[in-house]
Amino acid sequence: MCYSKAPKMNNNDVMSDILLRLPLKDLVGCKCVCKWWNTLISDPIFKLNYSLRNPQYNISGFFLQKFLYLELHSKLLFFPCEGRVDAAPKPSLSFIEDDKGVCIQHSCNGLLICSSFRCGEEDRKYYICKPTTKQYFPLPNLECRTVFGISIAYDPNRSPHYKIVSICDSYLSKNHRQIKIYSPVTGSWKPSGKPFTVPDEDMLFNRGVFWNGSLHWIGMGNLALRFDPETELMLTMPMPPTQRKPGYFGESGGHLLLVEAYGPLTAGFDIMEMKADYSGWFVKYHLNLDQVARRCQAIERANRLSILHIVHNHVEDVDESFIVIHVPGEFVSFKLRDYSFMDLQTNNHVDSGLGLWYSWEGVYPYTNTFFYL
């Protein structure tokens, strides 16, 4: 009689199987036990297997931030879009110890850039953090007078390392900007290239969007820029040839999306997508809000609305993309395919009586990727 032998497991396989069973916080602590464990846990295949084995940690959604007068901390809400609500990060940055308060500056694939809140630039500190594990790390001083924007460039499918890109002032003139890049490998900032000029029109450097391996910025006029942190090249990209102001600019599911406001958004609008080769924009969806308003009294009676977040999502070749908007006193979500409404889940208390007004500029998308600082 013939018996097949079970495949032998080496020490790495045995230990990986044990580590896969640990809660995330305990697993993060195991990285500090020894070099061997740190190597096992840092392996991309281990990270993938851990994510598949532990779906309870999967969550994606967005932080909503608002600054309140005389409040030390910014007001935060978190709205889950996919995954389990109980896996959502708590809407608080109080785990970052800063006596000036803390606010979010940028988000990218599970990481946040935060900074001191109520202070001048000379006293402002910047932090990279992961809210689900409450880890944070202070960044070195930027050594500049003004930071116009600071953004994270991180794609876990390409590299386990992130980079941070800041747009700073320059000694040359008030219209010059200097790019500085921080890498956790070197632990320091370095200037990237020579200072570049920007026109008088306002560039939204504080709203960088990471897509296709690059950071992207738009302005209030016709100028748009993209920067590749690997090649350190700054290039322009086309914008629709009309005068407008941005109504939304963001990324979802590998798509760069833009909404331009030519008038009140309550009249309807187009959601445009950038072509992968940067040759131009095309209309992805046209929204007729009259049809939506017939099903929702909050939209029907609204004299204004703002777009908060757009989620590009396909399930088995069916377009399940949806949009989240804010009308006075209410948050509304509906599918772009058929305008059917969706329940917005949250584990936060939403106080609609404060009369707060939110827009896409206060939204920070978040996905709980398997990453630790």
Image: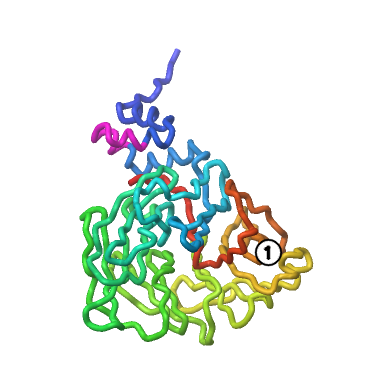
Quadrant where the image shows the N terminus: top left
Give the dominant element type of the magenta stretch: helix, strand or loop: helix
Foreground pick, 45 / 354: 354
Q: Quadrant of residue 152?
A: bottom left
Return the x and y of residue 312 as percentages of the image width and height: 57, 61
Q: Residue at x 43, y 39 (%)?
A: 49
Foreground pick, 4 / 113: 113
Return the x and y of residue 316 as percentages of the image width and height: 62, 53
Instruction: Tell me if residue 41 comes above or below residue 130 in the rendering.
Output: above
Seen as rendered, the residue at the extreme right is 294
Is 46 colored magenta in this rendering? no
Foreground pick, 46 / 114: 114
Which residues are drawn in magenta? Answer: 28-40
Question: In the shown orientation, is residue 324 left or right of residue 153?
Answer: right
Return the x and y of residue 130 as percentages of the image width and height: 40, 48
Return the x and y of residue 172 as percentages of the image width and height: 22, 82
Find disc 1 in the rendering and name its residue.
337
Q: Residue at x 26, y 53 (%)?
A: 184
Instruction: Tell me if residue 173 comes above or below residue 314 in the rendering.
Output: below
Seen as rendered, the residue at the extreme top is 1
Q: Residue at x 51, y 82 (%)?
A: 240
Dot 1 falls on a residue whose secondary structure is loop
Question: In the shown orientation, is residue 120 left or right of residue 322?
Answer: left
Instruction: Tell me if residue 335 comes above or below residue 249 in the rendering.
Output: above
